[in-house]
Image (cartoon, helix red, strand yellow):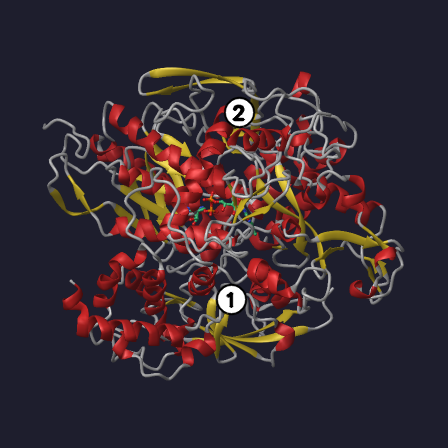
């Protein structure tokens, strides 16, 4: 056989890698791989241009400091780890904060229509957890605009031919091959457990196929749909992450689920009203009188309670989301001071988010995208009426565990194959599906950034893993792939044969209602115990579902059945993780344990799947583990790397507390005071 | 609990080659507040029973964001092409009819295959020819005015409404349609996108290009994002004419 090269395997096949997911994280990974000369197969459940990233509204953070406030990547790093309540490993966060200005400039070069200052520079606005203007934005549809920019660049790579090491075009092979409307089912593992490709299903023809890949990346987004209704898109079920977790990947910090304070209550989706509304000056309030019958706009100033501004004079309406959500919940749910509805005769779970004091012209330029959503779905004009909102499940800080290699300067070693690698050799993860950048609570506008940054890291990391590997996946016997394919084919056929009485969509609704009620803003151990046993019951009932649709084409019922099983498995990881963690940190809040407990819980929750328990999906929480990569062993513990910013209590009452550069003294403030 | 139900009349077909299965089915779906066509379909899925009391496979449709930014759920609702997510039930006469778009190959029920739209974006090179994603400093400065022109054009979701409504897009013509032409305008506005402007215009010089527009102006009527598509077509048409007349001089 010929020798393996950087482009061809011994058997002279083009050595492609696989990226699953074409949101911001996946697309950025693809672009970086292409730039490194690595051809990619890109799989996605939906056309990548319709990925959930399209929903992001408010913006992306980068401390470009155009307003001369003295912002810097160092302060961005500090505020991010403080906002995350010191649960994030700090070197990746540093890498991200340092790279942020460059990332926003790159997006600008790609043609993202960012809002501008009069001088033609990028404009920045404020977001939660900071006093700086750090968020670049394109109206209020920033995610859409960023996704389109990356999608366009990937489309360009789709037209480029693969070249061999001598620069000769390889006929019929393009740098990117897009496989849209494919559902990821599992990774193909060799006898050592390493990922050598994937098995996926074409959700139109329902055909199941196995694909070799010299490395695999999951950039499959969040899992909000486990909570039934959320701000997430309907495809955000976490199914892919759950599948590889069941194949042995470690899932980290699952219990950290972000609840966003301001979404529109509804029965299908809780549509977000971005934090940018508050960044542009929006104010949150309730009427002082719980029985207030006047319409929001008719309630005079003196009869309003601006409870966030009152309690947090420093950050006001822009306290981090976990704090804001708890305060809103307290007002409406515990104190029954939500907006009074004379029709129902009750105080609803609704709070006012008010923009009416801001000139319409400004709102149109900066927030039209979200105000349009409010207008279309609520049928009320937000320019002259305070909006009615309530907290909603929004983002998963937890996700697949991924590694990093720390550099001398405290950042990441560029191009290290360990960066963004899961504990399954050859399997990488990035974007909302990983756990790496946000600790116990994500700051607004840091996710678009972490997705793109993680993509920028994952591409080179996969490329170096691929050049160091001993044997290409394309030189493995066909049987390895056929076996994996057959396993999935059998599972699918078993689903088609299900003819029980239960309806999977109804079970999903039950799961969602329970998770939403019991595993979000406030968590109680006795309740969680019930949730965990209910999850087992739901799983057993789900197995008695009937899949009424046996059509050969586009069988959405069968696909959903599979996703439901995977959701239930992750729900258990989330609920059990919450049950175990007896402290309050960031988004995880237990009234019975109201304080952060660094002595016992300054650590990453690491979950491994194991068989056992009544539904045979027990969770094995570990404190350490080993994994192998290209012949080297790596030992991992649950210790958090806090080498750059020393943990200190988190207090947003004081302006500038989040960026007290010197560290321990939380009374000290910096120029961050606006 | 629901006090009343809403009647839906849905056009169905099991697959692209299964014209034999084409049929209308009717469903009474329990009403809920702020109900939209997709939330109704979700409700239906939990209990897919026709008005005749027959349990059938749930209707198949496409959706992602549920807030009209992804473009996935485009279909014909009460005779009008639009996103189903923003089709609020209380604002529509009943029964509510749902049909798949007609200008794209059918996949199943309400799902069609819009891949041609993505291929068209390749054809017109709807991208900035980037040197690379490594750090090269800030992008070109742009006026607020330029941003305010570009941003609305850039909100196209590739949803297909404009193609569906355009009389020139049909079996007998290869007209590329308004969406891709609008992208050419967008990229030819951008300071660095401009540098490859000629290539984009050339892609639109054929019969299937900008000349294919019959000026019916249906596109602007149906565009959910109110993109000034007619202006875009006029603008690109002027650009191509200019390029045709003087392009060789400028080379
Ligand atoms: C309403 C809303 C507003 C937001 N606003 C902001 C904001 O202003 N700023 C900010 O920083 N963040 C924001 N966020 C968060 C941010 O949008 C997301 O965290 C981010 O876009 C996730 O990107 P991703 O690339 O990880 O995944 P996604 O964009 O979710 O992409 C996932 C990809 O994986 C594919 N996929 C999933 N499962 C499978 C499977 N089984 N098989 C094949 N493919 C699969 C999908 O098709 C898709 O292509 C917002 C989130 C929401 C919900």
Measuring 38% from the left and 31% from the top, which residue is drawn there?
Answer: A427
- Crowd class of label 2 (few under 14; some 14 to 19; many from 20; radius 10 Å): many
Picture layout, residue A466 above or below residue A352: above
> Percent from the top left, x then y, of residue B38?
56, 65
- Dot 1 beta carbon under 8 Å from ligand 1: no
Q: Are marks 2 and 1 on the same chain?
A: no
Q: Is the N terminus of chain A in the top left, top right, bottom left or bottom right quadrant? A: top left
Q: CA distance from mark 2 to mark 1?
A: 53 Å
Residue at 76% across / 55% down in the picture?
A350
Given residues A233 and A376, the one toward you in this image is A376
Q: Residue A486: where, in percent of width, then height?
A: 33, 40
Q: Pick the quarter of the image with the C terminus of chain A.
A: top right
Q: Secondary structure at mark 1?
A: loop
Of residues B120 and A223, the one nearer the viewer is: B120
Question: Of the numbered discs in the image, which one, if any, rests on residue A5?
Answer: none
Task: Kindly tell me whether residue A182 is visible in this rendering.
Answer: no
Q: Secondary structure at mark 2?
A: helix
Marks 2, 1: nearer the viewer: 2
Q: Residues within 10 Å of mark 1 (few under 14, many from 20)?
A: some
Q: Which label sits on residue A90? A: 2
Residue, disc 1: B56
* Residue A424 occupies quadrant: top left
Q: How many marks?
A: 2
- Left or right: A313 with respect to A363? right
Does B222 sit above or below residue B186? below
Residue at image position (57%, 46%) is A224
Residues at badges 2 and 1 in contact (C-beta under 8 Å)?
Answer: no
């Amino acid at each position: 056989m010929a020798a393996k090269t950087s482009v061809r395997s011994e058997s002279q096949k083009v050595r492609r890698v696989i990226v699953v997911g074409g949101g911001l994280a996946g697309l950025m990974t693809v672009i970086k791989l292409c730039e490194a000369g690595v051809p990619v197969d890109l799989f996605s459940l939906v056309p990548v241009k319709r990925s959930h990233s399209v929903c992001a509204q408010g913006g992306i953070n980068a401390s470009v400091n155009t307003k001369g406030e003295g912002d810097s990547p160092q302060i961005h790093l500090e505020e991010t780890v403080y906002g995350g309540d010191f649960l994030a490993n700090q070197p990746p966060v540093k890498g991200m904060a340092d790279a942020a200005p460059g990332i926003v400039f790159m997006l600008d070069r790609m043609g993202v229509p960012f809002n501008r200052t009069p001088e033609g520079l990028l404009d920045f606005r404020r977001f939660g957890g900071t006093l700086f203007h750090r968020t670049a934005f394109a109206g209020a549809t920033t995610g859409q605009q960023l996704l389109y920019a990356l999608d366009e660049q990937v489309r360009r790579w789709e037209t480029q031919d693969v070249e061999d090491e001598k620069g000769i075009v390889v006929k019929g092979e393009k740098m990117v091959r897009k496989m849209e409307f494919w559902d990821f089912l599992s990774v193909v593992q060799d006898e050592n457990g390493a990922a050598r490709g994937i098995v996926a299903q074409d959700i139109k023809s329902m055909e199941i196929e196995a694909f070799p890949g010299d490395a695999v990346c999951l950039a499959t987004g969040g899992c909000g749909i486990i909570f039934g209704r959320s701000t997430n898109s309907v495809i955000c079920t976490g199914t892919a992450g759950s599948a590889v977790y069941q194949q042995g990947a470690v899932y980290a910090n699952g219990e950290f689920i972000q609840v966003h304070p301001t979404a529109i209550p509804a029965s299908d989706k809780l549509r977000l009203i971005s934090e940018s509304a508050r960044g542009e000056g929006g104010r949150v309030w309730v009427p002082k009188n719980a029985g207030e019958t006047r319409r929001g706009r008719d309630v005079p100033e003196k009869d309003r309670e601006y409870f966030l501004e009152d309690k947090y004079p420093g950050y006001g309406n822009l306290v981090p989301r976990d704090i804001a959500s708890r305060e809103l919940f307290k007002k409406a749910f515990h104190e029954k001071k939500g907006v009074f509805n004379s029709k129902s005769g009750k105080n609803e779970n609704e709070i006012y988010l008010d923009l009416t004091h801001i000139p319409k012209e400004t709102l149109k330029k900066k927030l039209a995208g979200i105000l349009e959503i409010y207008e279309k779905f609520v049928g009320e004009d937000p320019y002259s009426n305070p909006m009615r909102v309530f907290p909603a499940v929004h983002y998963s800080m937890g996700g697949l565990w991924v590694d990093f290699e720390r550099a001398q300067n405290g950042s990441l070693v560029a191009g290290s194959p360990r960066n963004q690698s899961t504990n399954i050799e050859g399997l990488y993860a990035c974007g909302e599906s990983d756990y790496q950048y946000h600790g116990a609570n994500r700051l607004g506008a840091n996710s678009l950034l972490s997705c793109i940054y993680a993509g920028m890291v994952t591409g080179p990391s996969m490329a170096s893993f691929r050049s160091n590997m001993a044997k290409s996946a394309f030189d493995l016997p066909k049987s390895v792939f056929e076996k994996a394919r057959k396993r999935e084919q059998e599972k699918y056929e078993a689903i088609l044969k299900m003819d029980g009485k239960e309806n999977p969509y109804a079970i999903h609704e039950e799961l969602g209602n329970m998770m939403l009620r019991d595993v979000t803003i406030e968590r109680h151990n006795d309740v969680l115990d019930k949730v965990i046993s209910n999850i087992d019951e739901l799983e057993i009932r789900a197995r008695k579902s009937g899949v009424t649709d046996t059509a050969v084409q586009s069988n959405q019922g069968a696909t959903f059945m599979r996703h439901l099983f995977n959701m239930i498995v992750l729900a258990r990881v989330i609920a059990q993780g919450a049950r175990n963690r007896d402290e309050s940190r960031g988004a995880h809040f237990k009234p019975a344990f109201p304080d952060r407990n660094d002595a016992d819980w300054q650590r990453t929750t690491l979950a491994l799947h194991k068989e056992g328990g009544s539904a045979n999906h027990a969770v094995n929480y570990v404190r350490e583990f080993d994994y192998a990569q290209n012949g080297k062993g790596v030992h991992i513990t649950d210790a958090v790397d806090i080498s750059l910013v020393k943990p200190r209590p988190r207090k947003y009452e004081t302006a500038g507390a989040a960026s007290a550069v010197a560290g321990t003294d939380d009374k000290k403030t910096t120029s961050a005071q606006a | 609990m629901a006090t009343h139900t809403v009647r839906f009349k849905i056009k169905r077909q099991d697959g692209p080659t299964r014209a034999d299965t084409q049929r209308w089915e009717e469903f009474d779906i329990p009403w809920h507040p702020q109900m939209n066509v997709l939330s109704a379909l979700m409700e239906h899925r939990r209990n897919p029973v026709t008005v005749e009391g027959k349990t059938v496979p749930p209707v198949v449709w496409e959706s992602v964001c549920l807030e009209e930014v992804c473009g996935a759920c485009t279909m014909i609702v009460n005779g009008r092409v639009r996103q189903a997510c923003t089709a609020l039930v209380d604002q529509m006469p009943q029964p509510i009819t749902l049909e798949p778009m007609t200008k794209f190959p059918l996949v199943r029920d309400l799902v069609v295959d819009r891949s041609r739209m993505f291929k068209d974006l390749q054809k017109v090179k709807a991208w900035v020819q980037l040197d690379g994603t490594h750090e090269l400093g800030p992008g070109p400065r742009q006026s607020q005015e330029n941003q305010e022109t570009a941003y609305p054009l850039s909100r196209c979701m590739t949803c297909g409404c404009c193609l569906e409504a355009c009389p020139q897009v049909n079996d007998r013509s290869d007209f590329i349609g308004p969406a891709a032409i609008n992208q050419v305008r967008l990229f030819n506005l951008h300071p660095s996108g401009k540098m490859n402007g000629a290539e984009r215009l050339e892609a639109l010089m054929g019969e299937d290009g900008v000349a294919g527009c019959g000026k019916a102006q249906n596109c602007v009527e149906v565009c959910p994002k109110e993109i000034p598509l007619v202006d875009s077509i006029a603008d690109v048409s002027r650009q191509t004419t200019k390029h045709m007349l003087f392009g060789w001089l400028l080379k």
